[in-house]
Image: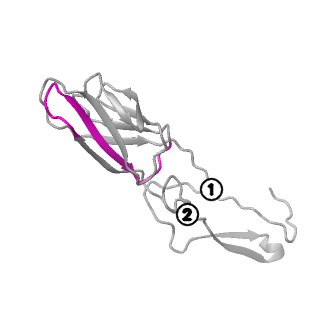
Amino acid sequence: FLQPLAAGQELQVTVVLVNGATESDPPAGGLSIACSLDQIAHGFAVTTRFVSRTLSVFGVEGGSVVGKLVRQRFDELAGSQTNPLVEKENMLMFKISSNIDFNAGSSITLSGLTGLPALYNVSSEFVVLNRTLSNDLILTAVVDMYASATYSLNISFINPDQEQSSPLLKLRGTLVLQASYA
């Protein structure tokens, strides 16, 4: 690593930054990198302003800017059904959108589907990966899902034979990372 650098020769510096746990915008004044080159012998130092390219990453506008952080969240989970009567054909229709891109193969877990019978059909941009004993429906995206776009999830079945109140539904996503930008 320590070797002479001839005049006019380019010095490449790689800086690795670890994202924090909270959302943030980039530093107001930007980042600066200071590189001191053998100050004793040559008596000079180089300070340069670090410039980030402003590209979209995972659907986050300006996501390539150093220091910009966002939390993955679902902007919309809206649902309705076609029939509230017991022992009748029903369809649950959900609209889902997120603040980030989800690549095909990413999974989304819909929790709280109490009363969903063992036999059902799913039609949408998802396929069922698994159904847990705790009434979680784990779905896999079969298409790339883009930030702020709305996607449909429709579940068809015959309603159970007992009345029930509407359950509290929760949505959780696991992102498959496939980002690249140049």
Tell me residue 162's x, y (percent).
13, 25
Where the C terminus falls, by quadrant?
bottom right
- Alpha-carbon distance for marks 2 and 1? 13 Å
Tell me residue 164's x, y (percent).
14, 32
Which residues fall within the magenta stretch? 81-103
Packing grade of label 2 (10 A; few <14, some 14-19, many >=20) is some
- First in sequence: mark 2 vs mark 1: 1
Q: Provide the residue designation for mark 1.
A: 16
- Left/right placement of residue 52 relative to residue 121 reads right
Task: Residue at 22%, 32% (x, y): give it.
Answer: 90
- Left/right placement of residue 168 relative to residue 108 reads left
Say which of 73 and 90 sits in front. Answer: 90
Q: Secondary structure at mark 2?
A: loop
- Left/right placement of residue 128 relative to residue 119 reads right
Tell me, what colour scheme is on the image?
A: one colour
Q: Amino acid at mark 2?
A: Val
Q: Secondary structure at mark 1?
A: loop
Q: Residue furthest bottom?
A: 43
Identify the image quadrant of residue 158.
Answer: top left
Q: Provide the residue designation for mark 2.
A: 65
Where the N terminus falls, by quadrant?
bottom right
Q: Amino acid at mark 1?
A: Val
Tell me residue 35's x, y (percent).
71, 69
